[in-house]
Image (spheres, rainbow, N blue to C red):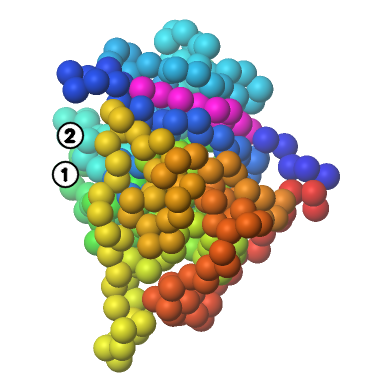
Amino acid sequence: MERERILEVKDLAISFKTYGGEVQAIRGVNFHLNKGETLAIVGESGSGKSVTSQAIMRLIPMPPGYFKRGQILFDGQDIVKKTEKQMQTIRGKDISMIFQDPMTSLNPTMKVGKQITEVLFKHEQISKEAAEKRAIELLELVGIPMPEKRIKQYPHEFSGGMRQRVVIAMALAADPKLLIADEPTTALDVTIQAQILELMKEIQQKVDTSIIFITHDLGVVANVADRVAVMYAGQIVETGTVDEIFYNPKHPYTWGLLASMPSLDTDGGDEGKLTAIPGTPPDLTNPPKGDAFALRSDYAMKIDFEQEPPMFKVSDTHYVKSWLLHPNAPKVEPPASVKARMRELEGSYEKPVLVKEGE
């Protein structure tokens, strides 16, 4: 039986009007999210990850941004067609967002307890005592010690990692059906990053919310996501389960992201080197005619510069936007650096237990 979908994005295209022309930030994006599932959207800066997440929350400033076409179906209703007043009842209650810098999400002049209870008062009919009790429960849920004392403190009295935990507590206050985490660990050091990622995983299991996890770092999603969508130049170029993306990647851009992950190998061999993706993303005021990644790819063919590839099906859950998947294309293996990284990942990451559609 197919799992119930909480979100479905269909042929979404979003542009921004600028002095330099129309920036086609999102160009025909399709993906879905099942209930209780975590989807990671991965790609380098400018790939369209954050614009996609802000579109779901309807946080894109209009103008200069505007929807060219497409649908964002949340619980069967098209968010694109909602009025701002209707969106105000959805934001924070049905869909919540965690931003990358906790200090921009918290009011430095207000105690954290008051900031959490404000969310509850806005979306629920609740007494002051019940709201305070719920705020303490939320701080406890996100792993903040002595929550009864901490709710009376200001954001500056918390460390960066603890502030991010407060932001997560605020996002969870109204029991959202969908939680969007936009680079939630970028501003944190590596140790705290790992703790926040583990917390996100625990929370998803406890409250059974659906999560979209936005990141530029493929390495952080291995243990938190069920499925991964790789974005490049405003399009999704590969999507699949975590296992499929990490152990059977098919798109040259995904290979590049894997090869650019920090290596655990310290013997100084070529396979252990950190590999950069050459070149820069295309100018989206004038997107390329064919495959957007062709100019940066060592595997580009003539057709890549002439015609945009369709999504080729690898499995029921794995799709790739590359002419390399065409039956007539030459058979190409991932480079040695990618294979080395895949071998490392095999031993260093705990594979998540996945429930595939149809089970």
Q: Quadrant of residue 106?
A: top left
Residue at image coords 27%, 17%:
17
The reply, left or right, for residue 49 in relation to residue 38 is: left
- Amino acid type at circle 2 is Pro
Give the side of residue 51 with respect to residue 3, left or right: left
Picture coordinates of residue 63 (x, y %)? 29, 13
Give the magenta part as a residue range.
6-15
Q: Amino acid at mark 1?
A: His
Which residue is at the front of the view, 16 or 166?
16
Q: Residues within 10 Å of mark 1 (few under 14, many from 20)?
A: some
Q: Give the alpha-carbon distance from disc 1 to disc 2, as whole Å.
A: 7 Å
Examine the structure image and report whether residue 102 is included in the region drawn in magenta: no
Up-down: is 188 above or below 135?
below
Q: What secondary structure do most residues of the magenta stretch adopt? A: strand
Using the image, tell me which numbered label, if any, was put on residue 108.
2
Circles 1 and 2 in contact, beta carbons < 8 Å: yes
Asked which secondary structure carries label 1, the reply is helix
Label 2: how many Cα within 10 Å (few below 14, some 14–19, many 20+): few
